Amino acid sequence: MIDKTIIEASNDDRDAGLRADYDALGEQLDRRGIDIAAIKAKVAGFGIAVPSWGVGTGGTRFARFPGPGEPRHVFDKLDDCGVIHRLTAATPRVSLHIPWDDAAPADLLAKAEETGLGFDAMNSNTFSDQPGQALSYKFGSLSHTDPAVRAQAVEHNLACIELGQAIGSKALTVWVGDGSNFPGQAHFARQFDRYLDAARRIYAGLPEDWRLLTEHKMYEPAFYSTVVQDWGTNYLIATELGERAQCLVDLGHHAPNVNIEMIVARLARFGKLGGFHFNDSKYGDDDLDTGSIDPYRLFLVFNELVEADGPGFEPMHMLDQSHNVTDPIESLMVSATEVQRAYAQALLVDRAALAGFQEGNDALMATATLKRAFRTDVEPILAMARLEAGAAIDPVAAFRASGYRARVAEARPAVAGGSGGIV
Amino acid sequence: MIDKTIIEASNDDRDAGLRADYDALGEQLDRRGIDIAAIKAKVAGFGIAVPSWGVGTGGTRFARFPGPGEPRHVFDKLDDCGVIHRLTAATPRVSLHIPWDDAAPADLLAKAEETGLGFDAMNSNTFSDQPGQALSYKFGSLSHTDPAVRAQAVEHNLACIELGQAIGSKALTVWVGDGSNFPGQAHFARQFDRYLDAARRIYAGLPEDWRLLTEHKMYEPAFYSTVVQDWGTNYLIATELGERAQCLVDLGHHAPNVNIEMIVARLARFGKLGGFHFNDSKYGDDDLDTGSIDPYRLFLVFNELVEADGPGFEPMHMLDQSHNVTDPIESLMVSATEVQRAYAQALLVDRAALAGFQEGNDALMATATLKRAFRTDVEPILAMARLEAGAAIDPVAAFRASGYRARVAEARPAVAGGSGGIV
Amino acid sequence: MIDKTIIEASNDDRDAGLRADYDALGEQLDRRGIDIAAIKAKVAGFGIAVPSWGVGTGGTRFARFPGPGEPRHVFDKLDDCGVIHRLTAATPRVSLHIPWDDAAPADLLAKAEETGLGFDAMNSNTFSDQPGQALSYKFGSLSHTDPAVRAQAVEHNLACIELGQAIGSKALTVWVGDGSNFPGQAHFARQFDRYLDAARRIYAGLPEDWRLLTEHKMYEPAFYSTVVQDWGTNYLIATELGERAQCLVDLGHHAPNVNIEMIVARLARFGKLGGFHFNDSKYGDDDLDTGSIDPYRLFLVFNELVEADGPGFEPMHMLDQSHNVTDPIESLMVSATEVQRAYAQALLVDRAALAGFQEGNDALMATATLKRAFRTDVEPILAMARLEAGAAIDPVAAFRASGYRARVAEARPAVAGGSGGIV
Amino acid sequence: MIDKTIIEASNDDRDAGLRADYDALGEQLDRRGIDIAAIKAKVAGFGIAVPSWGVGTGGTRFARFPGPGEPRHVFDKLDDCGVIHRLTAATPRVSLHIPWDDAAPADLLAKAEETGLGFDAMNSNTFSDQPGQALSYKFGSLSHTDPAVRAQAVEHNLACIELGQAIGSKALTVWVGDGSNFPGQAHFARQFDRYLDAARRIYAGLPEDWRLLTEHKMYEPAFYSTVVQDWGTNYLIATELGERAQCLVDLGHHAPNVNIEMIVARLARFGKLGGFHFNDSKYGDDDLDTGSIDPYRLFLVFNELVEADGPGFEPMHMLDQSHNVTDPIESLMVSATEVQRAYAQALLVDRAALAGFQEGNDALMATATLKRAFRTDVEPILAMARLEAGAAIDPVAAFRASGYRARVAEARPAVAGGSGGIV
């Protein structure tokens, strides 16, 4: 897919500069009592899952503007995901979305082996109707008033688990758009009871070594109320279901101004932080590239993760973005790097000093301690980890040099843009 | 379409109750020094334009769930709009969206005559790509960096004017999704200059008796910046272009918590209030039914309109909603009624008393004066105006009794739901 | 305080109009299958607690502009609260704030008897320092890093309970401003653990027939993080503490756009809805008069309360507002009335029809069912309930006619406005 | 105030590390084609004004918790401001607030010379009542319904100009809290006309070489509407008044999610960007330390300022923060440094490359170009600029070592905390 010589040529141009920067940073960190090699090792071991749907060009309700070489099916998607991991060494696993990615397990496993990838959490889809589907999700799925619709949605989730087991996944992520568009449309309590009942049936089908991750979202596609609208409801669900049920936090699914890192801390403290959908947002669930709008917020989330780290703390890390104006492969590479960057910065925090400032209510020095870590340019650490793993110092440059996009554009037919006819 | 006997039968069941309520309200208003007949006459003369695209089921980027009898083309849409006006006597005009509604002017005029409708503002579309379109709007239209794309967008707008002239429209509404998804993607000043330059070329093609209405929106489809992001920029545009350029206010296009009625007052005061896209919203540009979430806000907007009323003050009133879970015809009927309701309530405000309380800083009595008007149940006034115009006392009940939806569902083929493959 | 003849004279002017409106409404409701007398009886039995601090003029961090006759102490406040109940018959209880209202129990009970009032929930204050206080709450109270500060805060709450027991209160409301102004200032998990530990000690001192109501708030006075920031954390607290711990919902303490009525439904469903602080807001914790900004939202909250009503469901209802530009007595009278109005409207909802529409996913008719109840002008019901209780048909008019404010302004010395010197 | 030896001792400990970091950064920048000395020179010449009111501990409407050594009057404040400039070499001017800082011009000038400071924009205060003031601003100032109140407010502003002229200021900043707390309380159009009329009278008294900076704010202290609520209204004002009237942008005065850097670009493009009040915020007008919550947003603002730089572009830069939990001197030092940091980072942007990416719609590389500049740790540049100016490499450390706070705490009497009695 991406020839080794391409990567080496790209790296050769950048090697000397990288080594100079890495050494200078190493010296500075040494003065701060930090071993750069230890940080690099942790970063190298930190993998982010890529969403299979992320390698296609996204869109809005107004339009979608596909680019060249749009993937046609899960195998094209896995090829693209393989490129991302090849160039970044940061994304060892792919998260599938069913039924979009439905295929024979053996074929999926073969392709995974070919592309050097594994499978992360499975994602079910009961927020849109598929061709041939018996009952519609127009008015909900797991919380629908009609028990037959709920049963269909439960069955679909169980099928996702079954496929996932066959390909080595260990988690099911459930996000539903269920809610209402009008005051009075839904009975809040009964609707939630129906959701809980259906979720319990999915949980009952969960293998012993799996986790069920439920995802909350404030709004969209429902615009008045959403059944799993915030972490409070999500926590209720995870508590009602059982130990292997945990909450998934998508960074773009909260009300304006909400302190997300605090939610992360709360869920971690009560054993219910299951994982993340990383992205960034300025207005709503914008699904922009991770760290592109508020990189300090991303760092503060990772500050909590490093703080909470310990035995049994194993949140899953996944990207979930919509790439409307960039090459999806490039965006995912950069975003995976941004996640690693925030992690590396969080590792640099002087936690003993921080704890002291917190205990002594020295707010200024406490926040300065975080800022010092954040403003450290850790790019040399990330790049060196990539270089040592045989990946690219500058993944985007290497990708552009590789001609991959042009090659797949020849093999994959052009896709027309669409408009939902919706204003 | 809707047989007169259906309406009459529906009205007969409700006539006595309506008359009792109307009389009781008349007596109460009389005690308050208000002539109910005068209010009724004003309401009867107040028409709201219906968007042609509103009669189809809307959707989100996640899914669309069509209903039975989806309109296939502009002529089906005009049939549906005719039903709305037939039952409410409140929506005498339709606003077309080009190219979705492109057709021969003579055919449009014939259908309009058949359905008893006229044409309101024309709407251009440069936010999605159409089949066969030479250049893509992926990176903008009127503000695109490529002059050829800008020229194409200008041409399209001029074509909309040309068609509009042929069918009796008097305004062009321009909304563009141009903006950016990443900090740095667009140069704010140059992008706006390009927009202004292109808009000037459209304005140059505007007939003397037409208005150009530009519409601002905070975000979506662009998620970092939008060229015409708020009323401030919209006002700049209208001022730069000239006297016949005015601002269009969509109630769902503002930042959270913004005082929209104050923006209405500012634009009215400076002669730049061109019109409205009515809808309601709880989170973003939710395009919910008008008045369904915050009816008092709608009233406060109308309070400003009644206050600003006078010679030369002629804002255009249009609905702009996305009907995802209701029958679009029913939603548009109810929404038109909600607009009339807010207007009627605003007419009831004792303005002399209000002015006195304002001058004397009697905040409590000033706001009580508005509340007294708002909490008056003006439904009997609206219903009586409908009855006297030959429309339905209860439009939804009459519509359901008519069997119209089932009839068109037979004639119009079923449409499959869609999913953008976007999470 | 307010002479009976004043009220009677005021009522005489309005009696005929009220009876005409009441009769007309009664007939209309009868047609809708509703017994107006039953609604009136429920409204008459619905009391709202008044906050003692609400009868003084409020302010902002920029300034406070006192009015004439500001209450000097709890006994003046009880006089003012007595006037409110005398004229509205809607506010039988007062909620005290300690130490502001500290006094000998016997004196409080005597004054309560004189003014015809009882005592609602007690409110502790650990968000500001009092003269002579040993330790400062600058960096927190129940969650402070210093155990001595936490102990002081716990002691204060236990003292509030003790005083409350002596005067017949049955609940303690705890709101703390604890949080942080800078990322890193506080350790989220440890801070919350300290809060829980301190709260447990208060709970341990709670009499068997009392409730502990904890109140969440998104922000202010802490501007980066707040310990009890939302209903999720509040629910965690109530669950950790025990059965008599419940959550208090202040309508102004949520993130922008949040669906508050849904939170109410969730807490009610899980047995943790303890009560309300009613007010209204447009931007943040504005503490504006209840129902003054979004009356439909208030109605939707009451729609949930009526829906959840049943054995053991006994949320407490209290006003909590800051009256900066109105006469506090007038604002509290109007606000109590607005609470009753929302309650009366919610009682009018045709719940059988609503349930049917919900079950059938008839979103349009479901929401229309709510709207029909909301737009009914129930003022005649409220006024008649007042009249029959010997209170005023128009409380504000009667209050202004009484000359009460001028009288207390003579007895109570004028207060100078203040400025915190904060921009 | 701060002995030279203190600074030197503090610097000696840090000198070697700084030089190593500076050299390494210089080499890296050299590889990127940037001359580190040129950047350092620009930073050294970039001064930020300090608000006199910022050196006192701030507070909220709930409480204020003063620290030791609170300044008693403008001369104490100037001492504190002198320390800030002494240690940072970044804050050569102080912005006074009248009447809080009223004093004889000669005394102010003498103190300024003693502390090495000059005077920035003057600030008037018509949002709170002062002892002895004839008329109250409870219901507004420049837009009050009573012409006598408006005249008083105009007079006060003219007096501020007069004092400012005597001490070398060149601008007047006008912020008013005028607005309303209830729908209907104020007549929007008339209120704004009154504001404009009063503002014109102030502008008429403006010296030829002065600027009038008007400041908008979404809300607080008014909680329903504010006269100068956003940049749109602010732009209208500046346009109506004349060429020397410009808009002042406070980073915390906008609606949630608003793109502030775009507003900056708009005002700059149309010649109306007058200056800034720097601070940071998470929820509302939190007045937190600059860059403490969202440092990337601050960088994006400076990216616009560097982009717009050119002849005649001279926005004024001022801090405006409320220091509730930190030592105000420390917070102001750090905040001034954060402003310089954002400026230095913005100077590092490769503008030729950026323009190329923008022109070619290469969104990914455009934003990467900004990010590369942002993530560069420019602290060595800032610190070296300070060192070369005789200030401190680490201002906070030097300040703590100096014992200044303890010294002034002995001279200045302790202040009791306050509570407004407002919940």
Image (cartoon, coloured by chain):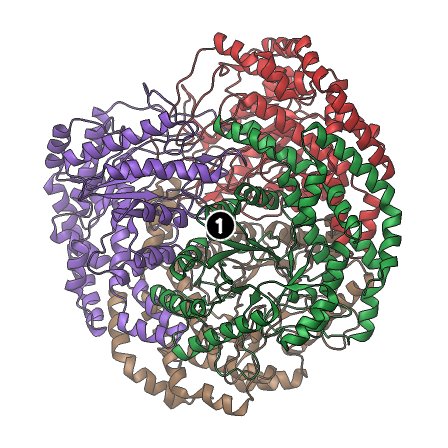
Chain colours: A green, B brown, C purple, D red
Tell me if residue B410 comes above or below residue A133 in the rendering: below
Q: Residues within 10 Å of mark 1 (few under 14, many from 20)?
A: some
Q: Determine if residue D266 is in view.
A: no
In the rendered image, the quadrant that contains the C terminus of chain B is bottom right
Tell me if residue A38 comes above or below residue A204 in the rendering: above
Residue B364 in picture, x, y percent from top left: 33, 44
Q: Please, which chain is the residue tagged with disc 1 on?
A: B
Residue B151 in picture, x, y percent from top left: 79, 65
Residue at 70 percent across and 21 percent down: it is: D393
Tell me if residue C134 comes above or below residue D356 in the rendering: above
Residue A407 in picture, x, y percent from top left: 83, 69
Residue D284 in picture, x, y percent from top left: 51, 41
B88 or C376: which is nearer to us? C376
Residue D110 left/right relative to C186: right
Q: Which image quadrant for residue A329?
A: bottom right
B107 or D322: which is nearer to us? D322
Disc 1 marks which amino acid?
Asn
Tell me if residue B344 comes above or below residue B9 in the rendering: above
Residue at 46 percent across and 50 percent down: it is: A271
D371 or B367: which is nearer to us? D371
In the picture of the structure, the residue carrying the numbered disc 1 is: B257
At numbered mark 1, what does the secondary structure look like: helix, strand or loop? loop
Residue at 48 percent across and 62 percent down: it is: B280
